């Protein structure tokens, strides 16, 4: 650990002033708590709303209104190839070549599609192990898949969790 590090509020304020990414904070709406920006640690998959979100959504709504199905092929951001607009910046973030990544559905949809493609239960191999308390939509996707194959979720899905009192 850096010898100069400490947990004082003064140290944190100095470090915040040195942060070259601090300008990003101004690009998001923060919920208010007692008239001040809340300290927001609970991002999960939602996070803070970008200030430019309303205009970005309105652009796509207008494309649908003006072009209907044509929005898939024409306009500012043709929907069919939308992932191609995102891959250059994502490749930089994750350190991959542009040709090595793509943008697809949500995690839950991808989980469901993957399991539907590869999960082939039989009489001896049908159990699915998943974390207890997983994101609710992931739990529903697994349960729906199990029912799709005519199996009972209570017999098929094994939820695991750390021993009581331990966190991983």
Image: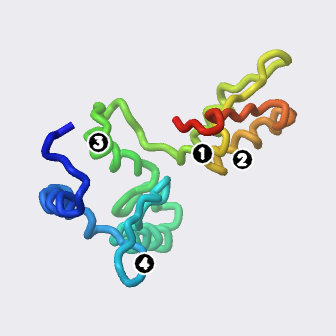
CB within 8 Å, label 1 to label 3: no
Is residue 22 positioned above or below 148 on the image?
below
Mark 3 surroundings: few (<14), some (14-19) or many (≥20) residues within 10 A: few
Tell me residue 65's x, y (percent): 49, 73
Q: Of 55 and 168, which appears nearest the observer? A: 168
Residue on which the image places disc 1:
108
Residue on which the image places disc 2:
140
Quarter of the rendering containing residue 141: top right
Mark 1 surroundings: few (<14), some (14-19) or many (≥20) residues within 10 A: some
Q: Of 136 and 75, which appears nearest the observer? A: 136
In space, the residues marked 2 and 3 are separated at their CA atoms by: 30 Å
Quarter of the rendering containing residue 159: top right
Eye-nearest disc, 2 or 4? 4
Mark toward the start of the polypeptide (2 vs 1): 1
Tell me residue 79's x, y (percent): 44, 55
Tell me the residue at 27%/65% (across/down): 25
Quarter of the rendering containing residue 48: bottom left
CB within 8 Å, label 2 to label 3: no
Is residue 12 positioned above or below 130 on the image?
below
Q: Of 66 and 81, which appears nearest the observer? A: 81
Is residue 55 positioned above or below 150 on the image?
below
Query: Residue 131 vs residue 53: left or right?
Result: right
Eye-nearest disc, 4 or 1? 4
Residue on which the image places disc 3:
93
Disc number at residue 33?
Answer: 4
Mark toward the start of the polypeptide (2 vs 3): 3
In space, the residues marked 2 and 4 are separated at their CA atoms by: 33 Å
Q: Secondary structure at mark 2?
A: helix
Query: Residue 76 vs residue 57: left or right?
Result: left
Tell me residue 38's x, y (percent): 39, 71
């Amino acid at each position: 650990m850096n010898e100069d590090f400490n947990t004082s509020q003064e140290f944190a304020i100095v470090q915040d002033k040195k942060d070259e990414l601090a300008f990003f904070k101004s690009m998001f709406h923060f919920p208010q708590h007692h008239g001040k920006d809340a300290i927001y640690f609970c991002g999960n998959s939602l996070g803070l709303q970008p200030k430019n979100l309303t205009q970005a959504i309105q652009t796509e709504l207008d494309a649908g209104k003006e072009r209907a199905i044509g929005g898939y092929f024409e306009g500012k951001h043709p929907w069919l190839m939308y992932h191609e607009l995102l891959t250059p910046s994502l490749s930089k973030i994750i350190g991959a070549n542009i040709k090595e990544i793509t943008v697809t559905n949500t995690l839950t949809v991808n989980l469901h599609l993957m399991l539907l493609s590869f999960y082939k239960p039989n009489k001896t191999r049908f159990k699915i192990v998943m974390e207890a308390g997983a994101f609710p939509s992931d739990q529903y996707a697994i349960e729906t898949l199990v029912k799709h194959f005519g199996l009972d979720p209570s017999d098929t899905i094994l939820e695991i969790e750390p021993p009581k009192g331990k966190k991983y």
